[in-house]
Amino acid sequence: MVMQPSTSLLLKIEDLSVYYDKTQALKNITLSVRANGITALMGPSGCGKSTFLRAINRMHQLYDSIKLTGSIRLESHDIDLLAHDTPVEWVRTHIGMVFQKPNPFPKTIFENVAYGLRVQGVKNKNELEGKVQKALESAGLWKEAKDRLQKNAFTLSGGQQQRLCIARALAPEPEVLLMDEPTSALDPVSTQVIEELVMSLCEETSIMLVTHNMHQARRISNDVAFLYLGELLESGTTEQVFGDPKHETTRSYLLGSIG
Amino acid sequence: MKALISPQQRRAKIYARIFVTASFAILGLSFLVLILLFADLLTKGLPRLSMAFLTSFPSRFADQAGILSAWVGSLCIVILCLLFAIPVGIGAAVYLEEYMNKSWYANQIEISLGNLAGVPSIIYGLMALGFFVYQLGLGHSVLTAGLTLSLLVLPIVIVSARESLRSVPDNLKEAAYALGASKLQMIRHHQLPYAQSGIFTGVILSLSRALGETAPLLTIGALTFIAFLPQTPIQPDFPFVNFNWLMDPFTVLPIQLFNWTSRPQAEFHQNAAAASLILVTLTVLLNLTAIILRNRSRRKYQW
């Protein structure tokens, strides 16, 4: 843990449920998330952690069969992210996302990072170049990429591509960065690079990280939320949850007897 | 020596070899037919090919007859057809793929599109005769022909465009949305560019189809003997362009061909062979252009 998160609130999630057709994937989640820290969502596969994460930037809205109820308040703006009169574009420029598999656009490295600014209508070349450089520096990719900004993003290695995706998400300067198992498709060395990167990033943004790897959660997070079968079983600081889990299921997960 | 593979595996290997041989033989056979046809065309038509043949109007004397009005007509109509069919087809595909809710109604449209692609072209001709020629009063014109052919190829363009729009991976679309892109931005900046090469494939297919069509054009009143060209769209006086050529009568290469082959004199059959060569060349040239465009966009966006 690089730094202690502030005590101010980032998100207040109340009574959040997600339904795929008729099955309920997420059951009445209520959770407060602290600002400027790393909050890890962990739990066995299929427990709803990705579903939870994708509810925050309203990714579920892309698919007709998925329904959401409840509210997610972004405290700094006092706005309900799920409300109908909150434009989804606003939500997504304030809340960035990094996906499980690196998914750069088949365009140049520069255009990948600049895209989030372009959709907001930024046309000024100097401003674009400045912000692209800043984002690439934050993502630790500037040194490797600065001489090949006009090369296709697919000329990068897998780990570099994921850092490019992080830079792309950082360029619009989001308040929250959602990361959906960002290292599960990477080798151990790339994973370590990304983990160190994530820890350094919480100085500029708050991070919510999905991981099925409890060691990763323990290594890098300040807070942990443990989900099991669509329910939030336990949440608290990482030390608390790992040191003295209150729930029997959490304990057996951490001991490795379920997973 | 003990066999390294089981009898079943050996049998599978033999079957595989038989299958490959048979496939190759069939491929060779169809290729051979193509070669023979083309050789036949060449021997009959090549001696008749000359600049004069390309720049003369049809005539009742076989040795003076040319295909000027036919190839100009073909070119005008095909270009007009693509001008209508490409934007409408891509627009329809985008709407069907990205905007329309999956419903009973959407399903019916899906089925109808498949069926429309298989409707005999003469039906399109009859429909165009009733609607474009009489209802809208467009006459037996270049415009009517272009519109008719565009209707004919529209299902092909739509189906192939939808297919390639659908093949753009969800994770790229989600990446765009996650950065705050609106649906229209996602489609314009990502989905359409990445689907471009597939869309071109559909356009190539429809182009060949449009060039070879005869029946619907006869139905809407193509002339078989035409000794003038459509008016030039550029004029010396203000406003320097005119669209009168759209309303001019027309003929196309396949119709000229059909006309010549149905005559008793052998000289005209030679003309028909020469005109076929031109038609084939025109098709190949147009396809080549489309393929070059497609490959360029394929190189640009690969993942």
Image (cartoon, rainbow, N blue to C red):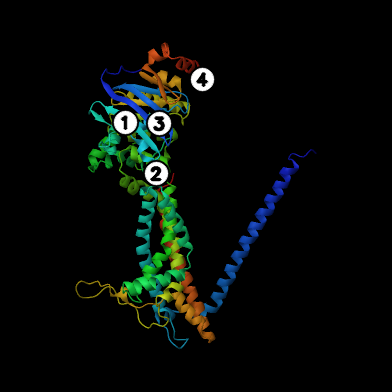
Q: Which amino acid is tagged 1?
A: Glu
On-image quarter of the C terminus of chain B: top left
Q: Are marks 3 and 2 in contact (CB under 8 Å)?
A: no
**Among the 4 quarters of the image, the one containing residue A190:** top left
Within-10-Å neighbours for mark 3: few <14, some 14–19, many 20+: many
The location of residue B86, given as percent across then percent down, is 37, 60
Q: Secondary structure at mark 3?
A: helix
Q: Which residue is mark 2?
A: A106
Q: Which residue is mark 3?
A: A51
Question: For this view, does B7 lie left or right of residue A194?
Answer: right
- Distance between the alpha carbons at the discs numbered 4 and 3: 20 Å
Q: Which residue is mark 1?
A: A137
Label 4 vs label 1, nearer the camera = 4
Going from N to C along the chain, the mark reached first, 3 or 2, is 3
Q: Chain of mark 4?
A: A
Q: Secondary structure at mark 4?
A: loop
The location of residue A50, given as percent across then percent down, is 41, 30
Count numbered badges in the picture.
4
In front of the other: A110 or B187: B187
Q: Residue furthest right?
A: B1
Q: Are marks 4 and 3 in contact (CB under 8 Å)?
A: no
Going from N to C along the chain, the mark reached first, 1 or 2, is 2
- Distance between the alpha carbons at the discs numbered 4 and 1: 40 Å
Label 2 vs label 4, nearer the camera = 4
Q: Residue furthest left?
A: B238
In front of the other: B249 or B139: B139
Q: Which amino acid is tagged 2?
A: Pro
Q: Secondary structure at mark 1?
A: helix
The location of residue B210, given as percent across then percent down, is 43, 67
**Among the 4 quarters of the image, the one containing residue B245:** bottom left
Q: Are marks 4 and 3 on the same chain?
A: yes
Q: Which residue is mark 4?
A: A258
